[in-house]
Image (cartoon, rainbow, N blue to C red):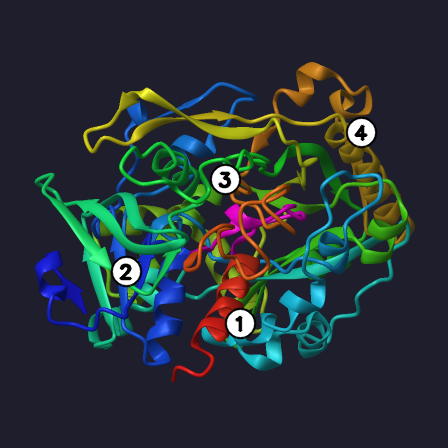
Amino acid sequence: MFIESVEQLRDSDPSRLVIVGGGTVGIYAAVLFARQGLEVVLIEAGDESLGNFGVETFESVGFPHRGIKIGRSKSLGGTSNLWGGQLVEFQRADFAGREWLPDSKWPITYEDVARYYEPTYRNLGIPAEMLADRDVFNGLKTDVPKFGHGVEIFLTRWLKIPSLAGAFRKELEENPNIKVLLGHIVTGFSGAGGNIDDVHLLDAKKAKHRISGTEFILAAGTIEISRLLLHAARQTDWIAPWRENDNVGRYFQDHIGGRVASVRPVNRKEFFNLFSSIVLGGSKFQPKLRLNNDTLERDHVLNMHAMLHFESSISENLVFLKQFLKAAVYSRKVTDVGGLIRNLIACGKHLPPLMWRYIVNNRVFVPSGSKISFVLQSEQTPLRESRITIDPSVKDAHGLPKVILDWKLGREEFPAMKDFTLRCQSALRETGLAELRVLEGLLSQDEAFFRTLEDNYHHVGGSRMGWSEEDGVVDTDLKVFGTDNLYVLGAATFRTASNANTTFVALSLATRLAEKLTAGKS
């Protein structure tokens, strides 16, 4: 249920669990804990409208980073209000580490996380029979070619309702175990020793409040979690247990990538049948290329994936129609009916084959004249000096310091992109599917071309998992070192970023934490 003030909590159970951040991971975790009978207070700085962080609250001083500005949302649902809802699993090699890649090994194994993939999919509404790629392709009666050069095809899964504020709206409103408090900014903590007793917060009128609890979870997003931990470490009236931990804010990572080649299909029918997005049983899947796990473990390569991006003269029209239909289906406010008519006319002759391919072939229609780009996304080398810091001399209206993001990249990314692209070029050619025309800037390793590549809004690190506070901020249970009851959820805890969207693994770790913290309590 939604509450308007802290005062409404006074008569409730003080042994509550407090979650800071009502974004993607925060909402998901709140729902899981509440289903187990725990009282949860979910605190969100924004409200239900799409809000951004003020430009005066952050600065990017390293490699240019767009995501700090346009890849975050201060609102209920957080960045799930901005994304398409794509779910991607990490591979075994991501956790095992690679000898040549420093700081890449995790203190937990692939099995520790992968066993929570299925229940997480289930919680998100992905059908059990759609969890294995082979089952999806078998359902389409599609033969998948065996690629060489360490390349394989895989499927990403997409949420039907990308915004978790929308997907879990009913439970947020009706489950009496959840108290959702909007428009309140968490500014610090208090406690004794390693135990956190309260979070400090300000309301819209800047009045000060405290909320007590038995466990506290930070789920406010990678950048805001680092800001809060770093700011709290400077409190003079309380000694934060992580005050001397220099790992806070370090090892910031993102995926870097962009268009690196153009694609010319050779066997057009097989190519489009293999790489067009799939719609089956009401669920969407997107075929992509990546390196298989054996190659990642054996060769000196970073993890990365590539998608085939189709662009035609009616691409914008189709995007408009998709957004309009989603608005109608999910009961959002429908506007611009005139725009609907104009875009339907623009699509014209393409609508019948679009509907036929969607209904009969379970595929998203791609016009035959579409330009096809080979778009790559790469993990980056974990670097200690790539970090989030704060400038205490510049504070926002709530007294929180300005964030300074110094995103740094290593020397491995650009050569690894070339290697992967050439592997895919050979694999596609040998199967007779397509030819890649690799951009000269990538082939020549031109630094100017490298500078055209961009981040992908996948913020990782700053509160990474470690064996001890010597090399991390949280332990294998996601508890902040030195504390008894403060946890961090989200990609902030990751040591590496794999090859694509990090949200699903963050949600899987939330499923894992919910199991641990609710054991014996329900």
Name the residue that disc number 1 marks: 121
Residue type at mark 1 is Tyr
Q: Tell which circle, 2 or 4, labels the residue nearer the N-terminal end.
A: 2
Q: From where the camera sits, is residue 124 visible?
A: no
Badge 3 marks a residue whose secondary structure is loop
To which residue does mark 3 refer? 457
Label annotation for residue 415: 4
Q: Residues within 10 Å of mark 2 (few under 14, many from 20)?
A: many
Residue corresponding to mark 2: 42
Q: For residue 417, say whether it is visible.
A: yes
Residue 348 appears at what percent x and percent y?
A: 43, 51
Few, some or many residues within 10 Å of mark 1 (<14, 14–19, 20+): many
Magenta span: helix, strand or loop, mainly?
Answer: loop
Disc nearer the start of the sequence (3/1): 1
155 with respect to 418 (left or right) = left
Choose the circle earlier in sequence order: 2 or 3.
Answer: 2
